[in-house]
Image (tube, grey):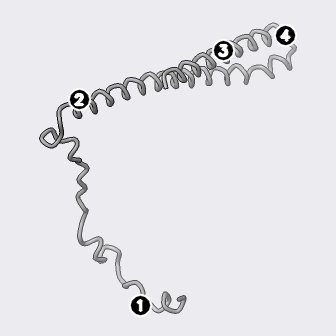
Amino acid sequence: MDELIKSGQMLPRGLAKELTITQNGLIALDLGHPARCTDQCLQPIIAYIKAVTQATNASHRQINHIQGEFKILWDNLQRLLSHLPLAHAYSDIDTVEELIKASMECFLGMRYLTESERRAR
């Protein structure tokens, strides 16, 4: 097999743009489906597909919003936790307690958002 590959008989020599596959050009894709055509589909089916699509889009919008809020809380939590070791190193106990309380609020918010996302799904 190695000898066949090295001999040059397996693949044609030349530039890539001279290959037959590149000379034929792009192949047009048809993404249409008969179920999408109104003349080939019953009106109740079209209405059902439209209703399912709208319901799906609405729930996805809500989930995307929840996930965006979760990301904001996550970023805030990371910022709070990054200050915690320095405040503790300087024995600033009041600041440490405030940072811990704020972090716990972020966790509670993230838990609430997770429960909301579960209900939305």
Q: Estimate the spatial distance between the alpha carbons at disc 3 and disc 4, rounded to whole Å.
A: 22 Å
2 or 1: mark nearer the eye: 2
Number of the label disc, if any, that sits on residue 9? 1
Q: Earlier in the sequence, mark 3 or mark 2?
A: 2
Q: Is residue 101 left or right of residue 47?
A: right
Task: Name the secondary structure under disc 2.
Answer: helix
Amino acid type for the residue under numbered disc 3: Leu
Q: Estimate the spatial distance between the alpha carbons at disc 4 and disc 2, rounded to whole Å.
A: 62 Å
Which residue lies most toward the left here? 39
Residue underneath mark 2 = 47
Amino acid type for the residue under numbered disc 2: Ala
Frontmost residue, 18 versus 32: 32
Q: Is residue 2 left or right of residue 30?
A: right
Rendered residue at 25%/56% (across/down): 29
Rendered residue at 20%/46% (across/down): 34
Amino acid type for the residue under numbered disc 1: Gln
Near mark 2 (Cα within 10 A), the count class, few <14, some 14-19 or many ≥20, is: few
Task: Name the secondary structure under disc 3.
Answer: helix
The percent coordinates of residue 10 (x first, y second) are 42, 87
Q: Is residue 99 left or right of residue 38?
A: right
Q: Estimate the spatial distance between the alpha carbons at disc 1 and disc 3, rounded to whole Å.
A: 68 Å
Task: Name the secondary structure under disc 4.
Answer: helix
Near mark 4 (Cα within 10 A), the count class, few <14, some 14-19 or many ≥20, is: few
Q: Earlier in the sequence, mark 3 or mark 4?
A: 4
Q: Earlier in the sequence, mark 4 or mark 1?
A: 1
The percent coordinates of residue 78 (x first, y second) are 67, 25
Q: Estimate the spatial distance between the alpha carbons at disc 4 and disc 1, rounded to whole Å.
A: 78 Å
Number of the label disc, if any, that sits on residue 93? 4
Frontmost residue, 59 versus 8: 59
Amino acid type for the residue under numbered disc 4: Ile
